[in-house]
Image (spheres, rainbow, N blue to C red):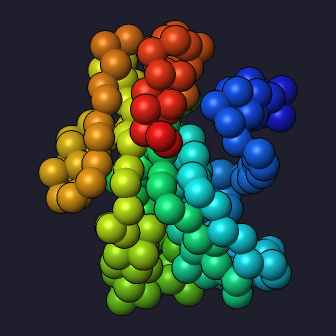
């Protein structure tokens, strides 16, 4: 997401009463590259504690790096996923690229191959996936998930499976709105969902 688009969400959160809004943007490679996962350890040196974390799209993958890999991990009490969460596997990577670029490429094998070149073995990948789910997504904290029936980038069945395993999770599935277009498409309903959740 470009900085000019982040302004709308910063303004939204301030309108909802946030006194401090920190925005973290990341190149996609930071979320999908194993060597970049390790690099994240040096990106944050100060411990941060937030009331609410707001993740858009693949930002949930980057969040895991900030929670699990950083020397001083981020902490928070509630989390909102817009057009997510994403899951750290080659299937999601392939689905994302193919639906974003409107093509059909066998990227699962390509992604797996790149990870192997980076030194990410099957056992390491399994450990990362388990850590990702346990430390990031399966935390016992309130979660709000906002998705759309029109979103072709996320894997809907993965989202539904994830929701079914949560204890304190609200999933609102809009009928319309493309990937990360929910606020633009449904501004009033979107704002009300956030207001209700954080209060």
- Across and down, in percent, residue 165 comes to 18, 58
Count of marks placed on residues: 0
The image quarter in which residue 196 lies = top left
Residue lying at 50% horizontally and 62% vertically, measured from the top left: 77
Against 161, is 35 above or below?
Answer: below
Residues 23 and 91: in front is 23
The image quarter in which residue 131 lies = bottom left
Residue lying at 43% horizontally and 39% vertically, measured from the top left: 197
Look at the image and tell me in which quarter the N terminus lies.
Answer: top right
- Across and down, in percent, residue 118 comes to 60, 80
Apparent side of residue 99 relative to residue 8 in the rendered image (left or right): left
Apparent side of residue 2 relative to residue 128 in the rendered image (left or right): right
Residues 123 and 197: in front is 197
Can residue 153 be seen at all in this image of the molecule?
A: no
Residue lying at 80% horizontally and 78% vertically, measured from the top left: 46
Apparent side of residue 173 relative to residue 16 in the rendered image (left or right): left
- Across and down, in percent, residue 102 comes to 48, 24
- Across and down, in percent, residue 105 comes to 43, 41
Residue lying at 38% horizontally and 11% vertically, measured from the top left: 176
Apparent side of residue 55 relative to residue 30 in the rendered image (left or right): left
The image quarter in which residue 135 lies = bottom left
Against 19, is 188 above or below?
Answer: above
Can residue 143 be seen at all in this image of the molecule?
A: yes
């Amino acid at each position: 997401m470009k900085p000019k688009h982040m302004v709308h969400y910063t303004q939204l959160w301030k309108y909802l009463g946030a006194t401090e809004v920190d925005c973290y943007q990341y190149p996609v490679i930071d979320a999908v590259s194993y060597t970049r996962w390790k690099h994240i350890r040096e990106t944050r040196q100060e411990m941060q504690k937030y009331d609410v974390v707001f993740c858009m799209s693949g930002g949930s993958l980057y969040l895991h790096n900030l929670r699990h890999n950083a020397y001083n991990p981020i902490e928070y009490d509630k989390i909102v996923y817009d057009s997510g969460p994403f899951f750290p596997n080659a299937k999601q990577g392939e689905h994302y690229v193919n639906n974003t670029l409107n093509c059909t490429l066998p990227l699962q094998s390509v992604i797996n191959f790149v990870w192997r070149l980076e030194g990410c073995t099957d056992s390491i990948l399994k450990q990362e996936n388990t850590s990702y789910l346990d430390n990031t997504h399966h935390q016992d904290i309130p979660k709000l998930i906002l998705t759309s029936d029109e979103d072709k980038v996320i894997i809907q069945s993965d989202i539904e499976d994830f929701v079914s395993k949560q204890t304190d999770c609200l999933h609102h599935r809009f009928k319309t709105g493309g990937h990360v277009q929910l606020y633009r498409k449904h501004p009033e309903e979107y704002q009300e969902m956030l207001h209700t959740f954080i209060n």
